[in-house]
Structure formats: C-alpha cells, structure tokens
Image: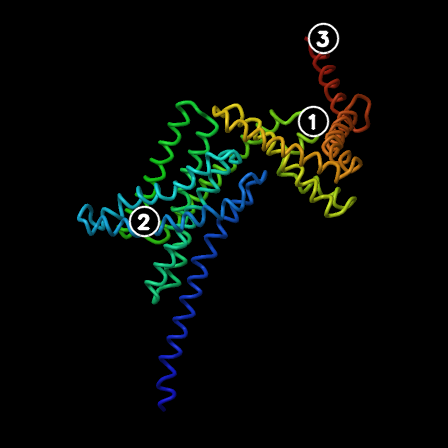
Amino acid sequence: MTFYFLAGPIQLRYYSFMVVWIALGIAFLVPLAFLWFLRKFDLYQTGQFKLNLVTLGCGMIAYWFAAQINPAMVNAGWVTWDQVIRITAPILEEILKAIILISLVQRADFNYVVDGALYGFGAGIGFAIIENVEYVTGNPEIALTVAIARVFSTNLVHATASGLIGTALAYRRGDSSWRGWLAIAGGYVVSMGLHMIFNTMVSAGAFLVVAILFGLTGMALIWYVIKRGLTIQKEWVAEKLNMADRATKQETKVVSRIETIEEILSPVEKRFGLQTASLVRTLVYKQAQIGIKRKLLETTASQNKTREINKIIEELVRETNELRNQIGVYCMMMVRTVYLEQDLRVWNLLNARVAAAGLSQKGGGLWDRVNDRLQQQSSQEDKS
C-alpha cells in the first residue's frame, strides 16, 4: 500500500518535470524556426548566418541587462511596476537590443534593409528566448500554455520591434540625407510604440487570440520589409552588374530573377551534376553581392569605408572568376542561354498564334474576321 501511495506523487512530479521540459523546447525552438523561416527569403544570401548568431547572443545579453535595470528602477522608487510594463521597459529593451545593430550596420560587409531586418529579428528572438525560460520555469503548473502563448505573441513582438529598428538603421546606410535620420527616428518611435501598445493590451487582460494576432501581424510586417528590400536589391543588381565584372546580360538577367534560380539549375544539375550546379548557385549569389556593393559605394561618404567596400568587391570578383574556371566554358554557355531560350520559345509561340489567326487560315482566323467586318460595313454604307 505504501508503494502505491508514493507512486502517485512521484508520477505527478515526473509528469510535471516532462511538461516543463517540453515547454522549454517549444520556447526555444519555435522562435528559432521563425528566424529560419525569414532567412529563407534572403534570396541573395546577403545576411550572414554567423552574424545572426551574434545577434541572438547579444539579444540574450540585452535581456540580462534589462532584468537588472527594470527592478532597480522600481526599488529606487523612480517608477512603479505598472509603469515599467507599459512605458519604461519597452523603451529600455528596444535600446538595449539595438546596440548590436548600430555596430553591425557600420560594417563594410553590411548591405541593406534585408540584413537589418534579419539581424534585428535575431536580436529580438535572442531576448525573447531567455525571457521565455524565466516565464516557463516560473509557472510550471501552466508551463505548456505559457510557452505556446508567448512564442506566437510576445516573442514575435520583441522580434518585430527590433527588426523595425534594424530596418531603419539599414535604410540610413543607403540614404545619408535627412531622410535617413528621419527613418531612424521613425523606426525607434514605431518600435517602442508597438511594444508599449502590446504590453498595455496584455496587462489589461486582452484575449490570448488577440495577442497572437498582434504577434503574427508583426511578423508579416517584417516579411513585407524583407520582400520590399529584395525588390530594391534586384534593381541595384540590374543597374550595377556589368561587363567590368565579366557578367553578361544573360547572367545579370539570371541574378535579377533570383526566385527562379532552381529552375535554371535544374537542367544544369541533370547535365553536369549536383556539384557543378552548386558552384553556379554560389556564382549567382556572389554576382548579386557585387552589384549591391557597387550601389552602396554611391552613398558611402567615409573614405575608409569606401576602401573596405572596394576590397570586398575585388575579392568577390576574384572568387567569381575562379568559380567560372571551375564551372567550365560549356556549362557557363548553357547558363547564359537559359533565359534566351525561354524568350525564343515565347516569341515563337506568339508568332505561331499570330500566323494561325492570319488571313486565309482555316477556321476563319483573326484577320479573316476583321476582313468580314470591314466588308459588312462597306456593304451597309453602299445600301444607305
């Protein structure tokens, strides 16, 4: 009897232990999955994975500082906890998360808003993950509910807010006029305002579904920013990638239509193998980065930064030349003609349809019908 009497509490503790660990897994892995999802839209692969890891780590450090400062302000009597939640915490946390972004945007290998959005999102995710651990372990009886609710609401708000600041800082990198500074100010205001609204809404007892919709809307906003940034980068590539970089018009066309890269590589892979197709993919990415870097030179005022960017361009050009040698002349000719062949097929199809609708074709083509209408109109005019 004693054994069965003890088994109940032991089993209950084991069950609670497992639930907490499952909740921690959700709280850790789902935010990382969101970051991985957004990185898939970085089609030119300008955002460096290692720097995303750095932003994750810095976001975690930012949480530690916020966890020290917020209670200290309350203990000093400067603010109440309610004021911390609604006002001071959103301001402080966004400033702390943005410190790494201010540093990264100054680097010569930083590109444009796609990088800013991804690095900012990463800093927010790092902050949110550590915050998740505190909330999950602090509420073991509802750990699973807390984890699921937070990853789809609070975590996305943290990531969106810092992603918007990263976007604003990146925009300033490409626009040194007053508009760039205005974008930074607007980015901070919108980011902090979004965070304040969410905290106020949640602390006032908003429904969970509303909080989740708020978080998902934020992620959709960052997705839109990345897509818009990619469109601008395509324009830069088409404008700046030229024969000086040994990129033909056909290669530039391929780079500008990066979404169809797998379509281009499919015949290459069948003909030359997976390794060669991988080399072609790398070549396309590096050509894109050359075009983007050349555009950034126009807005770089610092001479030191200009020299650093030029060195990166020179290294990219050297690497693309080596890739072309590895890929081989025959394969490069095939890549360069992929889009021309598609254009010719479309043009031939159009010509065939026009010919099929021509005068004297069976079935009364387009020109036959026009001719009949003209004859009918002439006949009616003669009668009148």
Classify residue 149 by image quadrant.
bottom left
Q: Which secondary structure, mark 3?
A: helix
Classify residue 235 by image quadrant.
top right
- In this picture, residue 156 sits left or right of residue 70: right
Q: Which mark is residue 249?
A: 1
In the rendered image, the residue lying farthest to the left is 77
Q: Viewer-proximal residue, 258 or 297?
A: 297
In the rendering, at what x and y percent does residue 212 appear? 39, 50
Q: Which mark is residue 37?
A: none
For residue 172, above or below residue 29: above
Q: Which secondary structure, mark 2?
A: helix
Looking at the image, which residue is at 40% across and 63% down?
144
User: If you read the primary sequence from the N terminus, does the residue marked by circle 1 or circle 2 appear first?
Assistant: 2
- In this picture, residue 298 sits left or right of residue 285: left
Q: In front: mark 3 or mark 1?
A: 1
Q: Viewer-proximal residue, 237 or 51?
A: 51
Cα distance in 3D space between marks 1 and 2: 52 Å
Crowdedness of circle 3 by 10 Å Cα count: few (<14), some, many (20+)?
few
Cα distance in 3D space between marks 3 and 1: 57 Å
Crowdedness of circle 1 by 10 Å Cα count: few (<14), some, many (20+)?
some
User: If you read the primary sequence from the N terminus, does the residue marked by circle 2 or circle 3 appear first?
Assistant: 2
The residue under label 2 is 66
Q: Amino acid at mark 2?
A: Ala
Q: Amino acid at mark 3?
A: Asp
User: If you read the primary sequence from the N terminus, does the residue marked by circle 3 or circle 1 appear first?
Assistant: 1
Q: Amino acid at mark 1?
A: Lys
Looking at the image, which residue is at 63% across and 34% down?
316
The residue under label 3 is 382
In the rendering, at what x and y percent does residue 320 appear? 68, 35
Q: Which corner quadrant holds the C terminus?
A: top right
Q: Which corner quadrant holds the N terminus?
A: bottom left
In the rendering, at what x and y percent does residue 178 appear? 39, 23
